[in-house]
Each structure stands twice: as C-alpha cells, then as structure tokens.
C-alpha cells in the first residue's frame, strides 16, 4: 500500500504529463504560428535516428529518397500515438494515487477509459469523472489529427502544383539557363512580370505554412527529382540573373520576388535552428563562383539573350542578390536532402534530417568563413 505522499506524487506526476501533452498538442496542431515544441521535437528526433540507419549517405539517392519519403508521414502519425501512450500512463498514475489500488487495476481502468471500451468502471464519482476526462482527451487528440491531416496535405498540394509547373518552364532539375532559354525561345522573356508575382505569392504562402506546420518542409515531392527547395533556388537565381546580367528594362517585380524568397528561406531556416547573418555585405562570399557565372552568361549569349556588356558590374550585382539567400538555401537543401540541382544541392552540406525545430529564437549571426557560409539577408 502506498503512503499518502506517494499517492500525491503520483497524482501530481500524472497531471503534469497530461498538461504537457495538451500543451504540445495545442501548439503543434492548433496554434497558427511557428512554435518549437520540445515534446514534438523529441518524437521527431527519435524517429529520425531510426530512419537515418536506412538512409545512410553511403546509399544511392534513389534508395535514400524512398526511405526519407516515409519519414514525415510516419512522424506526423507517431505524434498522436505517443501522446495517447503518455496519457494512458499518466492516468494510470492518477488512478493509483486516487483509488489506492494496485497498478494492474489502474492500467486496466486507464486503458478502458482512454479507448472508451467501458469494460472497467471506476468505483466512485471522483474517479468516474477522471475516467470521463481521459476519454474526452483521447477523443480530442484523435479529432485533432483527423482535422490536421487534410490541412497539411492541402498546403502540400498547393506547394507542389507550383513546383510541377516550374519543371515545365525550367526542366528537372530547374535551372536559370533552361528557364531563360525557354522564355527567350517562346517570346516570354519580356513578359515575365506575372510569373514573378505568382512566385512572390508562393513564397509568402510557403513562409506561413512551413513554419506553422513543422513537418511540412520534410514532405517530399511525388517526383523524387523535384523538390520545393530546388524550385525556390531556381526561381531566385533566375530572378537575380535577370536583374544583374540581362540587358532589359528594369521592373520591380523580380526584385520583390527575390525579397519574398529570401525572407521565406530565412524564416524556415530560423525555425529549424539555422543561424544566418541578418545584414550581410554585398561582397560577402557566396557558393557560386565567377567562372560559373561567366559560363552561364556565355551560354545564354550564344542562345541570343541580351547579356550586359559590363560583366564585372553584372557579377557584382549578381553577388549582391545571391548573398541574400545563399547560405540558407544550401543549409535547407541539405536538411531536406534535396535532389541534385546546380548552384543548389550540388554544393550544400550533407545534413539530411538535421533535426526537428530546436531553437526558433536563436540569435542570427554572421558566418563569413567560406563560400558555403555566405550571408543571407542583405540587399543588393
């Protein structure tokens, strides 16, 4: 027989666990803003360690992609299961502390109440009310998941429509060279402002959904060679090249699209704990070299596109735009294990499944040690 102190400790522990799960569930599934939840983060990390065994960098991309494609769905579904398990144990503590019965009876009563089976009835009114509260919490958790899944898949579908549309214009993987060449050949080059406006809206929506629903960035495209980060990088690079190197009349649309894009990347990167410089210099190092930039200029000039004569100034302008998003683009590419794409995942650090949110409010700092750590939030 447990002492009064032991019973009180069990009840307090049970109530604390219940409060923890309710708080985590509300902030994960209901709160309409990005919030780092320690319980959710722990579940995702534990599951990540299992998937990492089967997604070793030593394996080919196709094999790793098939494994990682299951990670986010399994992680989302594991949250309510782990939550229900903790609720089950928490109420067993409470029943032991209030009924002063053995552990076996407490677990049976807790399981019967949580699953609404009804084969075990508490002996008095107070414990009956406790059983009612457990049943209500269990049903509420299931209802939250049922409501959460359509929301997250609606956001996923809207994201992927734009990613697929980009592959029509810019190939798979999408590249600035392919994009601008097709735009030139189809007479679309001088009428791209509506396209930049569409992607500015896309960046804004992704910024909101991919920080409100922390699992969404890890959901992979239906086509293993497409990815939302690769698409974002291709659009930003194309807009940057259009402003820096193409001899065309100035319009504000591509510049606003770039700003929306790097703001989105910074928000998502910050949510997942990546540091970045909030005020970089225009000449900070970036991961794209001058030779790569000149090669693209030569290739597009051969296709008949109007390339500016002053290549040095064009390069400085390009660097000033790219520095806004260079390091966060590469970091997120490694984080989501993006497929191969030039100027993007081909030079990103190999950090698949780095972690689930670990510190949204970490201080953003400059890291100017090399081309892979270029600053990300300056202005051209």
Image: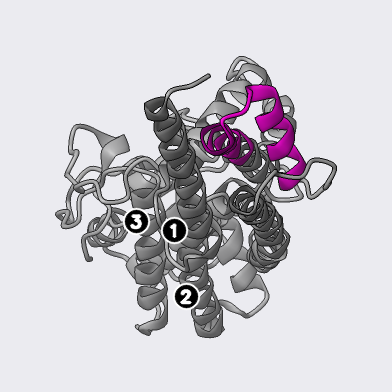
Residue 153, numbered label: none
Q: Can you tell which quarter of the image residue 104 is in?
A: top right
Q: Which residue appears at 22% of the width and 61% of the height?
A: 313
State the residue in front, 324 or 343: 324
Query: Which SS does the magenta portion mostly show?
Result: helix
Measured Cα–Cα span from mark 2 to mark 1: 14 Å
33 sits to left or right of 158: left
State the residue in front, 249 or 21: 21
Q: Which residue appears at 63% of the width and 23% of the height?
A: 102
Which residue is tagged 3? 266
Whether residue 89 is visible here, answered yes or no, is yes
Measured Cα–Cα span from mark 3 to mark 1: 16 Å
Badge 2 vs badge 1, beta-carbon distance below 8 Å: no
- What span is colored magenta in the figure? 86-113
* Label 2, residues with CA under 10 Å away: few <14, some 14-19, many ≥20: many
Whether residue 333 is visible here, answered yes or no, is no
**Picture coordinates of residue 100, whole percent (x, y):** 56, 30
* Label 1, residues with CA under 10 Å away: few <14, some 14-19, many ≥20: many
Q: Secondary structure at mark 3?
A: helix
Which residue is tagged 2? 200
Vertical relation: 47 (above or below) 330:
above
Q: Which residue appears at 21% of the width and 48% of the height?
A: 364
356 sits to left or right of 76: left
């Amino acid at each position: 027989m447990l002492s009064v102190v032991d019973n009180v400790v069990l009840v307090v522990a049970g109530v604390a666990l219940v409060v923890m799960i309710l708080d985590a569930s509300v902030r994960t599934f209901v709160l309409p803003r990005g919030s780092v939840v320690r319980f959710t983060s722990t579940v995702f990390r534990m599951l990540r360690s299992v998937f990492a065994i089967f997604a070793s960098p030593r394996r080919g991309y196709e094999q790793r992609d098939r494994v990682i494609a299951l990670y986010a769905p399994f992680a989302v579904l594991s949250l309510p299961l782990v939550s229900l398990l903790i609720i089950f144990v928490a109420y067993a503590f409470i029943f032991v502390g209030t009924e002063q019965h053995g552990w076996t009876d407490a677990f049976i009563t807790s399981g019967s109440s949580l699953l609404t089976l009804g084969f075990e009835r508490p002996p008095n009114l107070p414990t009956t009310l406790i059983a009612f509260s457990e049943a209500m919490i269990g049903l509420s958790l299931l209802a939250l998941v049922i409501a959460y899944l359509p929301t997250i898949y609606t956001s996923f579908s809207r994201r992927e429509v734009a990613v697929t549309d980009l592959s029509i214009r810019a190939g798979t993987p999408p590249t600035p060279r392919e994009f601008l060449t097709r735009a030139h050949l189809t007479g679309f080059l001088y009428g791209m402002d509506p396209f930049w406006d569409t992607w500015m809206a896309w960046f804004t929506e992704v910024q909101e959904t991919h920080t409100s629903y922390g699992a969404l960035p890890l959901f992979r495209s239906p086509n293993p060679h497409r990815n939302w980060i690769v698409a974002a990088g291709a659009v930003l690079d194309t807009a940057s090249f259009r402003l820096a190197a193409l001899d065309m009349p100035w319009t504000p649309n591509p510049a606003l699209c770039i700003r929306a894009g790097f703001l989105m990347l910074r928000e998502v990167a910050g949510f997942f704990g990546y540091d970045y410089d909030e005020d970089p210099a225009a000449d900070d190092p970036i991961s794209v070299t001058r030779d790569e930039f000149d090669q693209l200029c030569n290739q597009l000039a051969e296709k008949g596109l109007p390339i500016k004569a002053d290549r040095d100034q064009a390069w400085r302008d390009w660097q000033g735009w790219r520095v806004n998003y260079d390091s966060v683009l590469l970091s997120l590419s490694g984080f989501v294990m993006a497929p191969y794409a030039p100027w993007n995942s081909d030079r990103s650090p190999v950090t698949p499944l780095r972690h689930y949110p670990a510190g949204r409010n970490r201080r953003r700092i400059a890291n100017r040690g090399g081309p892979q750590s270029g600053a990300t939030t300056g202005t051209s």
